[in-house]
Amino acid sequence: MKRDWIDTQIDAAMKRGTRKFTREPHAVSARYDARSARVKVELSNGCTFAFPARALQGLSDATDGQLAKIELSPLGAGLHWPLLDADFTVSGLLMGIFGTRAWMAREMARRAGATSSPAKAAAARRNGRKGGRPRRTRGERAA
């Protein structure tokens, strides 16, 4: 009885996987283009997408040689960089997910803080004329 149930579950999972594989796009190839510093992924539906390789968590300091060594998962659902021990799902990359939630939040904050604009520069000048950023008190430091 138990063996029959397990076989039924395995068969159902195989059918779901086959349906998903035939209906949803998956990677058929991936390569790193050193000239543009982008990874280019060919999908089973004929589409191609590219992204900046060093924008991914764990790949920012990688060499061109390390980035060029890309492996596809057996069903094309993921990309793996064996020399960097980095893995990303194709669906996640298509949605713009280049790292963990915490890493993405830090990266977005870092980039936002580095952004300059005429309004930001004017606000900094006004603040400077007032004596700059107010010093924190001891009570504020502990908080």
Image: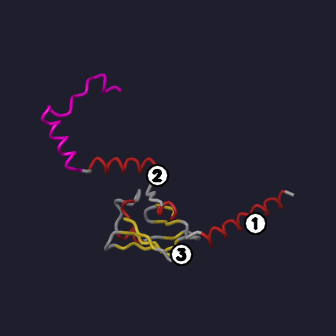
Disc with the residue nearer the chain's start (3 vs 1): 1
Numbered tag placed on residue 45 in the rendering: 3
**Residue extending farthest bottom:** 46
Residue bearing the label numbered 2: 100
State whether the magenta stretch is mostly helix, strand or loop.
Answer: helix
The answer to which of 70 and 139 lies nearer the viewer is: 139
Which three-letter amino acid code belongs to the residue tagged 3? Asn
Residue at the location (44% across, 59% down)?
A: 96
Residue bearing the label numbered 1: 11
**Residue extending farthest front:** 119
- Foreground: disc 2 or disc 3: 3
118 is within the stretch colored magenta: yes
- Foreground: disc 3 or disc 1: 3
For the residues labelled 1 and 2, the Cα–Cα distance comes to 33 Å
> In the picture provided, is 95 more to the left or to the right than 9?
left
Residues in magenta, as a range: 116-143
Residue at the location (35% across, 59% down)?
A: 60
Disc with the residue nearer the chain's start (2 vs 3): 3
Look at the numbered disc 1 and give the secondary structure of its residue: helix
